[in-house]
Image (spheres, rainbow, N blue to C red):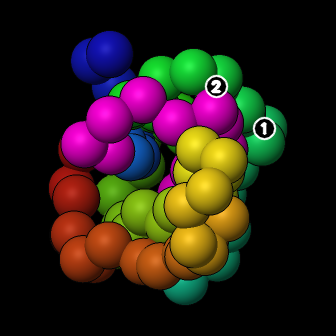
Amino acid sequence: MPGTVNVVVTVSCTAPVPEITTRAALYKNGQLVNQSTLRSQRNTRTAQNNAAVRCSPGNYRGWMYFKVVFPPGYNPPTASANGFGQEVALSC
């Protein structure tokens, strides 16, 4: 969308899993400016989520959280992680 800053997070598995949960967040100059809801998608190999704000000059960085529930018998039964992306300076 013109005039916005957007972060999209994607989780991809090699085969369908019972559930993938994601959350996306957007930071400007080190401060949280928007965060998505926690989104769960079932019986899929990929999942996405996003967060966006109106663009204003600054340094932006995306963040993501994910949790995967693996099929029965898989060890470990779940995995999760979170992390930041690279900071980008935008002048809008």
Residue 68 x %, y % = 59, 53
Q: Is residue 23 above or below residue 44?
A: below
Residue at the image point whose x is 57% and y is 21% from the top: 43
* Type of amino acid under label 1: Thr
Residues in magenta, as a range: 12-27
Distance in Å between CA atoms under marks 2 and 1: 13 Å
Within the magenta stretch, is there residue 14? yes
Q: Which residue is mark 2?
A: 41
Circle number at residue 6: none
Is residue 79 in sight in this rendering?
no
Q: Which residue is mark 1?
A: 37
User: Is residue 37 found left or right of 35 in the rendered image?
Assistant: right
Given residues 85 and 71, the one toward you in this image is 71
* Type of amino acid under label 2: Gln
Name the quadrant containing residue 55.
Answer: top left
Q: Secondary structure at mark 2?
A: strand
Q: Is residue 20 above or below residue 32?
A: above
Q: Secondary structure at mark 1?
A: loop
